[in-house]
Image (spheres, coloured by chain):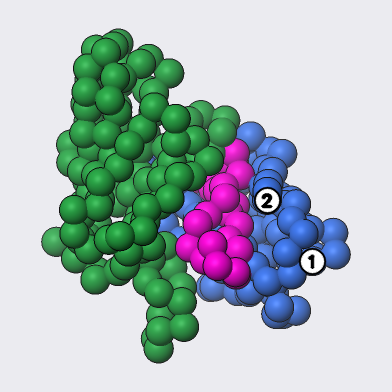
Chain colours: A green, B blue
């Protein structure tokens, strides 16, 4: 089974709808991230969480909110979807720095392709 | 804020040949890490190689190597003996070594085509 899973994998919705993208991980990592990918722009950070009680805005947080329900779960919500939120969304995790054996790698989920009509 | 720039939107290479993908970055930090990620059509993000800024030696992973020029803030990826499976989008990424540990800043990406 994949270490980082995202649901749904693909979603088409309409302008104004509320959408939730879910991310779960079995790696036991404390740190989780949400990125969006747009052609020509690469991946940009939306929100990140360094533990269950620590949530921070990233580069492009407007129009998004997140919830860290548990160490293993980090959800991204679009309260009222708009067409320019059409993108590929990635969840990622990483371990704590300084921990023995930490490979210092960010592990990505398979992505969710969201289309807002 | 840090920025990462990949000035080559697309590159192509013949199978078995060598190709170099360019990346430049801007930062005022001295402690940081640089990465190259590969994204094949499956859209999975795969770490290719990483470089710590404090290390002068260029990182190497099998057919992949980097040319890290810290003073010039340049971090290019060389792929030797290119294979069809190397065809993908490649992203250069930067990560601070400080308290914001973990967050990645990505470049725009370079699409690599490998011709048989």
Query: What is the chain identity of the residue bearing mark 2?
Result: B
Question: In this picture, is B96 found above or below A88?
Answer: below
Q: Is residue A24 magenta?
A: no
Query: What is the chain identity of the residue bearing mark 1?
Result: B
Which segment is the magenta one?
A: B87-110
User: On the rendered structure, is B56 left or right of B97?
Assistant: right
Question: In this picture, is B3 found above or below A113?
Answer: below
Residue at the spot 85% in from the left edge and 59% down from the top edge? B72
Q: Residue furthest front?
A: A53
- Residue identified by numbered label 1: B70
Residue at the spot 52% in from the left edge and 54% down from the top edge? B104
User: On the rendered structure, is A22 left or right of B75?
Assistant: left
Q: Position of residue A5 (x, y in %)?
A: 21, 52
Q: Residue furthest bottom?
A: A100
Residue at the spot 37% in from the left edge and 53% down from the top edge? A55
Question: In this picture, is B88 found above or below B72?
Answer: above
Q: Pointer 1: residues within 10 angstroms few (<14), some, or many (20+)? A: some
Q: Is residue A79 visible?
A: yes
Sequence-wise, the earlier of marks 2 and 1 is: 2
The numbered disc on residue B2 is 2
**Mark 2: which secondary structure?**
loop
């Amino acid at each position: 089974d994949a270490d980082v899973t995202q649901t749904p994998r693909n979603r088409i919705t309409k302008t104004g709808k509320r959408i939730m993208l879910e991310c779960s991980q079995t790696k036991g990592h404390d740190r989780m991230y949400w990125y969006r990918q747009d052609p020509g722009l690469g991946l940009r950070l939306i929100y990140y969480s360094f533990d269950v009680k620590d949530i921070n805005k990233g580069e492009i947080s407007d129009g998004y909110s997140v919830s860290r329900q548990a160490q293993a779960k980090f959800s991204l919500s679009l309260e009222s979807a708009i067409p320019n939120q059409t993108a590929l969304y990635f969840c990622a995790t990483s371990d704590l720095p300084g921990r023995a054996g930490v490979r210092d790698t960010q592990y990505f989920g398979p992505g969710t392709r969201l289309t807002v009509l | 804020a840090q920025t990462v720039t990949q000035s080559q939107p697309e590159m192509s290479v013949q199978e078995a040949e060598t190709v170099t993908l360019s990346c430049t970055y801007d930062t005022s930090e001295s402690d940081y890490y640089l990465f190259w990620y590969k994204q094949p059509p499956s859209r999975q993000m795969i770490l290719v190689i990483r470089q710590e800024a404090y290390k002068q030696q260029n990182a190497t992973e099998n057919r992949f190597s980097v040319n890290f020029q810290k003073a010039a803030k340049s971090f290019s990826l060389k792929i030797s003996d290119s294979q069809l499976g190397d065809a993908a989008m490649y992203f250069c990424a930067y990560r601070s070594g400080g308290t914001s540990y973990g967050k990645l800043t990505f470049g725009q990406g370079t699409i690599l085509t490998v011709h048989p």
